[in-house]
Image (tube, grey):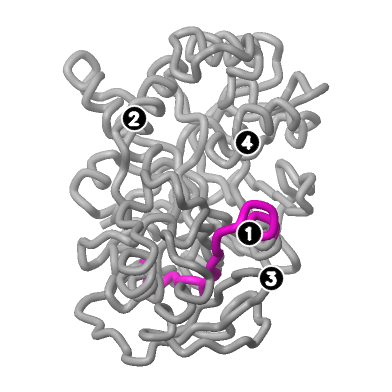
Amino acid sequence: MATIRSFRALRPRPDLADKVASVPYDVVNTEEALDLAKGNPYSFLHIVRPEIDLPSSTDLYDDTVYDKAAENFQSFIREGFLEEDPEPVLYIYRLVMNGREQVGIAGCCAVKEYENNTIKKHEHTRKAKEDDRLRHMLTLRAHAGPVLLTFHSTSEIKELMAKETSETALYDFTDADGVRHTLWRCRFSKELEAACSRVPALYIADGHHRAAGAMRVKEALFQREPEGEYNYFLTVTFPSDQMAIYPYNKYVSDLGGLSTLDFLATVEKSFYLDRSGRTEPAEKGSFCMYLDGQWYELKEKVPSPAADPVAALDLSKFQNKLLEPILGITDQRNDGRIDFAGGPGSPKKLENWVDTQGGVAFTFYPVEVEELMAVADAGLVMPPKSTWFAPKLRSGLLIHRF
């Protein structure tokens, strides 16, 4: 059964919460992080993207980057930007975007449950990214950003969460993207822990590399500190019926050596092409394509068999019938011809790329949370870059030290 455990959070002073809270480290590059943190010495980007405080020529994986993260982290504590709660508790974290609300539990989950698959995965991790998170965590001796989880909630858990949110919040602010973030310190942590312990499994939605990094922290420290706090890692867990997944759409920089006419003729062998002008598919079983200023909607002429939960995904059908055989892209993670744009507003970004650089773009119907969970339950992995979760949790609001 699952563990969601209370912890003593290191967190911002209430008057600084909106200034400290930052976007996750992996949704911005160095230049974007530098711009977001400009004029804000409290931004947690100084800790999760510390290269912004070093010369621009600095290699992102140089020791000085991790040392700077630790230096900035200790400075935030010393200057009183961050304070530690006096006793372990759970927290309730509510996000509101475009009128849609999701309310989750912030706490710590057991690394051993990640190892034994009580916490289920749906994607492969890359060693280089794991190495980066491992070094960052070990240098800080802290989990600085939460892993986003989901689960099949119960009426008991929802009732306890509702009781917690009836009180005055610790933090309540709206970020620059218009997302409202509200955090409560739980009064009934033990009851909520007990209710969560009856949940059979948790599912990683976003943050596979942070979770894998936390496992490797345990491997690094276990021999000399077997009972250490590192045996748990920072998470925020939302009920699956509140989660929203946006598509991770795709851009390919060329047509694989084909002319526009030949490419369209080849695509038409497997798909019906409708010049609908639709920028996003209206339902499952189709996807949209932008080429030479025209949007098309594509549907399979002969439906692919669904041998397993992965094969049933529209993304798998796209990959197996168009991306690989026609465009010649077999490795989406490493092929330099493909790029991705996720979340609301991504079709406009794709249009701009095609109009200015050529190539072709594709948009997809969002994967459903239940589809993702079915893939994880089957012990399989999603196609690369399948899901974009929004809104994003802010880093720096809760920190777990070990």
Task: State if disc 3 and disc 2 touch (CB < 8 Å).
Answer: no
Task: Work out whether residue 15 can be spotted.
Answer: yes
Verify whether residue 354 appears in magenta. Answer: yes
Magenta highlight range: 352-372
Dot 4 crowding, Cα within 10 Å, few <14, some 14–19, many 20+: many
Task: State if disc 2 and disc 4 touch (CB < 8 Å).
Answer: no
Looking at the image, is 155 positioned above or below residue 340?
below
Task: Work out whether residue 345 can be spotted.
Answer: no
Instruction: Check residue 397 in the rendering and tell me which mark sits there, or answer none.
Output: 4
Quadrant of residue 323 within the rendered picture: bottom left
Instruction: Check residue 128 in the rendering and tell me which mark sits there, or answer none.
Output: 2
Quadrant of residue 14 within the rendered picture: top right
Image coordinates for residue 215, horizontal then vertical, percent: 28, 34
Q: Considering the image in quadrants, where does the N terminus appear?
A: bottom left
Label 2 or label 3, whichever comes before in sequence order: 2
Dot 3 crowding, Cα within 10 Å, few <14, some 14–19, many 20+: few
For marks 2 and 1, give the one nearer the viewer: 1
Image coordinates for residue 151, horizontal then vertical, percent: 40, 63
Image coordinates for residue 33, horizontal then vertical, percent: 67, 30
Instruction: Check residue 354 in the rendering and tell me which mark sits there, or answer none.
Output: 1
Image coordinates for residue 90, horizontal then vertical, percent: 51, 44
